[in-house]
Image (spheres, rainbow, N blue to C red):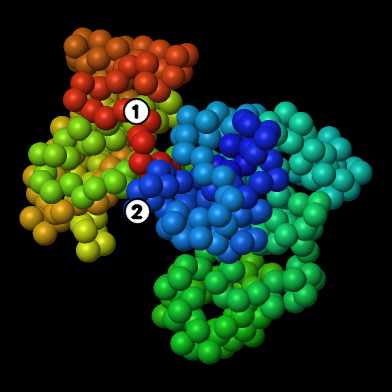
Amino acid sequence: MFASCAAAEDPSLRGLPLVVAGDPGDRRSIVLTASYEARSFGVHTAMPVREALRLCPHVRIVPPDRALYERYSRQLFDVLRDFTPVVRPVSIDEAYLDLAGCPGLAAGPLQLASVIRRTVAERTGLQVSIGLAEGPWLAKMAADLAKKRPDGVLLLLARDIPEFVWPLGVEAFHGIGPKTAAKLRQLGIRTIGDIAHADPAAFSGFGAYGRRMRDLALGTDREGLPEDGPPVSISSEETFARDILAPEALHPHLVAICDRVAERLRGEGYVAGGLGLRLRNSDFRDYSRQGRLPAPSARAEDLRSEAQALLRRMPATAFPCRLLGIAAHRLVRVDARPPELFPDDAAQRRDQLWQAVTEVRRRFGADAVRPLGGQSARPRKPSRDTR
């Protein structure tokens, strides 16, 4: 999606090999995403930018722009909600839709999907792929396969699974990660068809999801749409151009990242009851610490105070540090918080202040208001925000 947003914003980039990445002069810059044109040259996500330039010397490189992606994401979901009120976002660029009873379905699901896809393109400039099925898992598999089709749409029924799904490797199974795929291959299970025909006892070591894998591969699982609940966490992380040698040198980055996480919490209507801090050292070893906030909050200073406390708990071996990540968890919707018996006037004023900051940034850009002692609200080096 990041590459699609860049091309939608600048039509001159359409059809060109394009990657979203950090400074190409920085040896640590990696490809955050690549357009399909760039992928045809072998360029892929997480590849060093220098390697991408070797494979495709004429590739266009654009910097990441979180505000741009969030704006297009809102536009995308607005279009989808014009077709059905039941939209379940699962990421910034992906959602499940329940199309039952929708106007236009009488013409057939494929025709409706084509109308949705064309409307998204007309109103946002984005090209999307759509998978149609009777359940979420198969719809996700169909959407992945639809990316390779000229029309970007694929309908998969249970009877189609042997033809379209079983030949795929276990890595293509939605919900299976690299470690699980490796364990399956050790058992001689190499394709999704192998999962469908394996002895159920073979999945005893894969936990609760293992018991469902075979049912999903057979098309007998009857799951519904994911519940429209809160995200597990809202996080942001930054990879540094040069290793940070000491904890005190992390301070401006910690301030800026806490500010970004707090901004996203307020923008999405959540407060956080807990915080996680992650450091990656120069040997690519990760260190993490978890903590609870005194009270659920979306204020940057509250996140920053807890993050600093977690940083003091980090071992010396976490440095030199090449990556800093902060994740707010134990999320609660603001309107779901119980009212306080004895409200704190000062706390209410701080909440009003931060809401004003959010509104100023919405109108004038992320750098219109910046935290004292922090980096730019839009980092120059690659960062990643997730929910």
- Which of the two residues, 217 or 236, is positioned nearer the viewer here? 236
Amino acid on which disc 1 is placed: Ala
Q: Under tag 2, what secondary structure?
A: loop
Tell me residue 14's x, y (percent).
Answer: 69, 41
Residue linked to disc 1:
377
Front residue of this view, candidates 59 and 367: 59
Residue at (83% x, 35% y) in the render: 103
Q: Amino acid at mark 2?
A: Arg
In which quarter of the view is residue 99 placed? top right
The residue under the point 82% across, 44% down is 114
Secondary structure under badge 1? loop
Q: Which mark is residue 27?
A: 2
Tag of residue 69: none
CA–CA distance in space, label 2 to label 1:
23 Å
Of the numbered discs 2 and 1, the one sitting upstream in the chain is 2
- In the rendered image of this protein, does residue 4 appear above or below residue 78? below
Q: Is residue 377 visible?
A: yes
User: Is 296 placed left or right of 152 in the picture?
Assistant: left
Residue drawn at x 66%, y 80% as measured from the top left: 193
Q: Nearer the viewer, residue 218 or 44?
A: 44
Is the residue under label 1 in contact with that under label 2 (CB below 8 Å)?
Answer: no
Q: Residue at x 56, y 45 (%)?
A: 60
Does 232 appear above or below 368? below
Label 1: few (<14), some (14–19) or many (≥20) C-alpha neighbours in 10 Å: some
Query: Could you say where residue 249 lies in the image, as x and y percent from the top left?
Result: 13, 39
Side of 87 where 381 appears, left or right: left
The C terminus appears in which quarter of the rendering?
top left
Foreground disc of the pair 2, 1: 2
Residue 155 horizontal/vertical position (percent) = 79, 58
Residue 273 on image: x %, y %? 27, 37
Q: Is residue 281 above or below residue 360?
A: below
